[in-house]
């Protein structure tokens, strides 16, 4: 292949400089793509391909007009490409081109999506040689709003939880993290983020520390008290944003540490199970966020979502939010007014970013001025409502520097016209009186315009012409157009320039002079206004922090008003929050399901003596809904929201953990039994005494006996060791027996009524275990032939009897599994429990130890020394399985 020269050669050598996927190179009024890039872009964006020859070869070429680049960039970046943009600039010897920016998913400023757009970096502490013990460091930056957050993570799971929570669009894995296939795969599966392998040097601890210290100030960084790995992540992001040329570093005014202590742990699975921001099917509709979101502004929506994803533990913080919500929900009129006023507000954080980047236009600045004006209006509304005035809202609205805000607003209002154009290079942006030089140019400009506007009338009068108009176009410039009938009567100094069907066009020396003058003035005005505009925009950019403060205050009031509206419209109540164990809901409802269903409210009572509820009931009776309702209510309470209940007392939790049995999830193709077990294992490790644990049909993804065994052991572990507040729904009736041996376990069941051959689901939760399974009944209803139904009743009856014998060696009703009678610490019934086939034939009556064979005896001894309470459940199960295997082998 021959070396390309000329424009293609320049393109290819610029392309070789960048690691971007695609290069867009300015050529005059177009951005052009060549060679492979042209083909790719043409394919992705339906552009027309043409050819460019260079040095005897022909290259594919595609292009877009300068002004249209943004939507194409956006489309390419949203498809996951990184696009380098090379601009053309004038030099003494012609022009040259240079890459000015690399647009990536995490540095795209031109977003129209209201959601946060996080760029994340994740660094493994060990690998960078951090000696402060931070396992993982994470940083998140939203270039569209300037938000910059950092946090330490205790391990890889923790890191993933944070990543899942922020749902970044682009992730920069540190040098080591990119070798961690498991982390990367999970990231690919769980998020839509683009993974970018940024220069490893940028993650070097010293260099990163410098970068962060320089940008945010040394003192701030020290005060953050985060690990070295975390600073490395933050530094890498700063460098990346700088290098990609997004030009928004100035809007990143503040770095905040999000330490876990004050936040409720919500692992990725739980966020998904509770359908916080999207349903299990991946829809936004029907999520908890979508249900409670009545915010007026996109910034308010972003904040409310953030609250949901990061519930709090601080009683003070929550009670303050509650006070505001309470005040707003009772002051309905003032709330309406506030929401109206917020309707006028634009996204100030985004405006600040655009100003820093230099892409804000005059309309943006005008919008900023109007939004700054919302602040005093809101303050006024709050002050004039006694309820609101006494609430924390007064303090929220006073947080930003109100005086500085009103000065900036005045500056902008005095500068920008009421309805400026969207182009910033062609004038008409500024008000009269803003700048004397500009005023002089405008005066002259207006004068000439005036002269031109009145020319047609003057000519008509002076030369008695009819049908005269004065206009301009690109080819003819300014001209006097005279109708055909009158064209013969034009004065001599008229110079004809064109003949049309019904008219002729003329010019005069004077008109040509004026034309030159007006073009000169237009250019002068455009340039001057642009200069002034850039100054003004820089001034606005320098006030990024103020804009962010005001934006934050407005967003907070928006989010609180949204919570208040929802509470008022749905009769939610303010929960009593406390630091104790009690969780009491009177007539609680499910926050989402109640929107679409005639919901049957249910009570919940959990406390020190009743910390573990086994929830039983037939299929489809409402077990899952009941438990999710409890988790949802606790979560809402911990963002400061009211909750769907008649009365609520809620002990704050430090984490919410949920796990849905593999069978339910398998049906949706989401999970395997292995995943179910590893998540169970996570919960058993991570939950504490102050956590809320929801287990829904755990153990269901495997054979019955396996399943029961795991469920049983997990229950004991949670009850004895973890002591978390737990709700466990199960269709294993056997588990209801746990209430007899474990003091804090209580049974509740979802009632169903069977009358005249119909099962009615009452959806009412009552104390005590469910008395039976309705499976056979459903089979009957479904038309399964009578003999089969009869026979299955027989079989069920026999199985029940046998199990009773197997467990206790007598007619006792306590349905305890032979293998896992861990309550008494004894192995009752040596018969294999696996499948239970041998149980019926077994002669063993349980107390005849003499007849046990030696292998079984050895098994018994091993079992006796097995540390039930300290062995992790999964290991326990596998140990017990091995014991069973030995028994079986011994039998044969
Ligand atoms: P289970 O987990 O016991 O199989 P689900 O919780 O999945 O049952 O509930 C089954 C159906 O009943 C769902 O469609 C749910 O919306 C509805 N449901 C559950 N609880 C209630 C309730 N308290 N009031 C009204 N409908 C309910
Ligand atoms: Mg269920």
Image (spheres, helix red, strand yellow):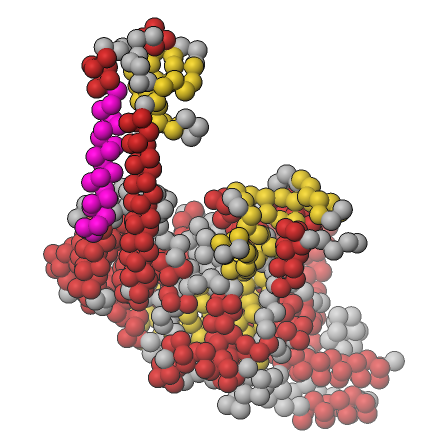
Residue drawn at x 41%, y 81% as measured from the top left: 213
- Pinpoint residue 397: horizontal percent, then vertical percent: 21, 63
Q: What secondary structure prevails in the magenta region?
A: helix
Say which of 475 and 726 sits in front: 475
Say which of 301 and 362 sits in front: 362
Residue drawn at x 40%, y 76% as measured from the top left: 215
Q: Quadrant of residue 305?
A: bottom left
Which residue is farthest front? 492
**Side of 195 relative to 487 (left or right):** right
- Pinpoint residue 594: horizontal percent, then vertical percent: 41, 51
- Let me know if residue 454 is in the magenta part: yes
- Pinpoint residue 302: horizontal percent, then vertical percent: 39, 59
Residue drawn at x 58%, y 52% as measured from the top left: 24
For the C terminus, the quadrant is bottom right
- The magenta region covers 434-456
- Let me know if residue 83 is in the magenta part: no
Q: Quadrant of residue 22?
A: bottom right
Q: Is residue 84 above or below residue 477?
A: below
Q: Is residue 214 visible?
A: yes
For the N terminus, the quadrant is bottom right
**Side of 117 relative to 544 (left or right):** right
């Amino acid at each position: 292949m021959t070396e390309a020269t000329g424009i293609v050669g320049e393109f290819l050598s610029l392309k070789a400089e960048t690691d971007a996927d695609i290069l867009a190179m300015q050529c005059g009024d177009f951005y052009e793509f060549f060679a492979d890039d042209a083909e790719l872009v043409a394919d992705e964006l339906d552009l027309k391909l043409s050819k460019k020859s260079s040095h005897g070869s022909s290259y594919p070429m595609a292009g877009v007009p300068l002004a249209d680049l943004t939507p194409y960039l956006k489309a390419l970046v949203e498809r996951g490409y990184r696009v380098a943009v090379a601009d053309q600039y004038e030099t003494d010897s012609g022009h040259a081109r240079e890459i000015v920016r690399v647009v990536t998913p995490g540095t795209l400023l031109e977003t129209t999506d209201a959601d946060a757009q996080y760029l994340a970096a994740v660094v493994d502490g060990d690998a960078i040689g951090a000696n402060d013990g931070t396992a993982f460091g994470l940083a998140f930056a939203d270039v569209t709003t300037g938000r910059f957050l950092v946090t330490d993570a205790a391990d890889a799971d923790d890191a993933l939880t944070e990543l899942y929570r922020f749902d970044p669009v682009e992730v920069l894995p540190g040098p080591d993290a990119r070798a961690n296939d498991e982390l990367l795969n999970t990231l690919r599966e769980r998020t839509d983020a683009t993974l970018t392998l940024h220069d490893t040097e940028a993650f070097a601890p010293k260099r990163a520390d410098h970068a962060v210290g320089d940008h945010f100030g040394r003192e701030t960084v020290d005060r953050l008290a985060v690990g070295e790995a975390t600073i490395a992540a933050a530094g890498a992001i700063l460098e990346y944003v700088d290098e990609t040329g997004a030009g928004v570093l100035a809007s990143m005014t503040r770095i905040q540490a999000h330490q876990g202590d004050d936040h409720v742990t919500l692992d990725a699975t739980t966020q998904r199970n509770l359908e916080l921001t999207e349903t299990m099917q991946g829809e936004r509709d029907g999520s908890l966020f979508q249900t409670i979101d009545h915010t007026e502004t996109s910034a308010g929506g972003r904040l409310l979502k953030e609250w949901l994803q990061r519930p709090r533990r601080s009683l003070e913080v929550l009670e303050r939010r509650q006070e505001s919500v309470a005040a707003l929900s009772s002051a309905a009129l003032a709330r309406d007014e506030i929401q109206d006023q917020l309707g006028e507000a634009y996204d100030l954080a985004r405006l600040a970013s655009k100003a820093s980047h230099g892409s804000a236009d005059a309309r943006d600045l005008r919008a900023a001025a109007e939004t700054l004006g919302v602040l005093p209006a809101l303050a006024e509304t709050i002050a004039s409502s006694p309820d609101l005035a006494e609430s924390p809202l007064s303090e929220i609205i006073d947080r930003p520097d109100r005086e500085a805000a009103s000065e900036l607003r005045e500056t902008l209002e005095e500068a920008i016209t009421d309805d400026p154009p969207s182009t910033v290079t062609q004038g008409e942006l500024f008000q009269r009186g803003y700048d004397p030089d500009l005023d002089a140019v405008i005066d002259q400009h207006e004068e000439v315009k005036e002269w031109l506007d009145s020319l047609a009338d003057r000519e008509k009068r002076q030369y008695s012409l009819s049908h005269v108009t004065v206009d301009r176009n690109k080819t003819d410039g300014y001209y006097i157009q005279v109708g055909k009938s009158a064209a013969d009567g034009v004065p001599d100094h008229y110079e004809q320039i064109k003949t049309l069907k019904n008219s002729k066009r003329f010019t005069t020396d004077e008109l040509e002079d004026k034309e030159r003058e007006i073009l000169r003035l237009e250019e002068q005005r455009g340039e001057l206004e642009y200069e002034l505009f850039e100054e003004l925009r820089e001034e606005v950019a320098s006030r990024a922090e103020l804009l962010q403060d005001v934006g934050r205050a407005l967003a907070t009031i928006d989010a609180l008003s949204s919570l208040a509206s929802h509470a008022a419209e749905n009769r939610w109540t303010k929960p009593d929050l406390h630091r104790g164990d009690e969780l009491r809901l009177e007539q609680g409802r499910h926050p989402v399901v109640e929107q679409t269903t005639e919901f049957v409210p249910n009570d919940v009572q959990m406390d020190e003596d009743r910390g573990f509820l086994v929830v039983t009931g037939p299929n489809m009776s409402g077990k899952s809904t009941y438990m999710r309702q409890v988790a949802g209510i606790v979560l809402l309470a911990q963002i400061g929201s009211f909750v769907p209940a008649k009365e609520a007392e809620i002990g704050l939790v430090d984490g919410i953990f949920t796990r849905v049995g593999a069978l339910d999830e398998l049906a949706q193709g989401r999970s395997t039994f292995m995943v179910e077990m590893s998540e169970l294992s996570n919960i058993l490790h991570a939950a504490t005494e102050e956590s809320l644990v929801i287990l829904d049909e755990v153990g269901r993804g495997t054979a019955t006996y396996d399943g029961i065994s795991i469920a049983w052991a997990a229950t004991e572990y949670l009850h004895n060791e973890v002591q978390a507040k737990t709700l466990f729904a199960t269709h294993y009736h056997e588990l209801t027996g746990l209430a007899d041996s474990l003091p804090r376990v209580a049974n509740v069941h979802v009632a169903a009524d069977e009358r005249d051959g119909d099962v009615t689901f009452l959806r009412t939760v009552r104390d005590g275990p469910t008395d039976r399974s309705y499976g056979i009944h459903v089979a009957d209803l479904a038309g399964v032939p009578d003999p089969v139904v009869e026979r299955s009743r027989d079989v069920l009856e026999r199985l029940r009897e046998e199990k009773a014998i197997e467990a206790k060696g007598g007619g006792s009703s306590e349905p305890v599994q032979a293998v896992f009678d861990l309550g008494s610490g004894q192995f009752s019934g040596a018969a294999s429990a696996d499948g239970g086939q041998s149980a019926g034939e077994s002669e063993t009556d349980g107390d005849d130890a003499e007849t046990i064979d030696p292998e079984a005896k050895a098994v018994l001894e091993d079992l006796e020394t097995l540390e039930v309470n300290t062995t992790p459940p999964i290991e326990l199960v596998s140990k017990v399985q091995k014991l069973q295997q030995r028994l079986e082998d011994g039998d044969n």
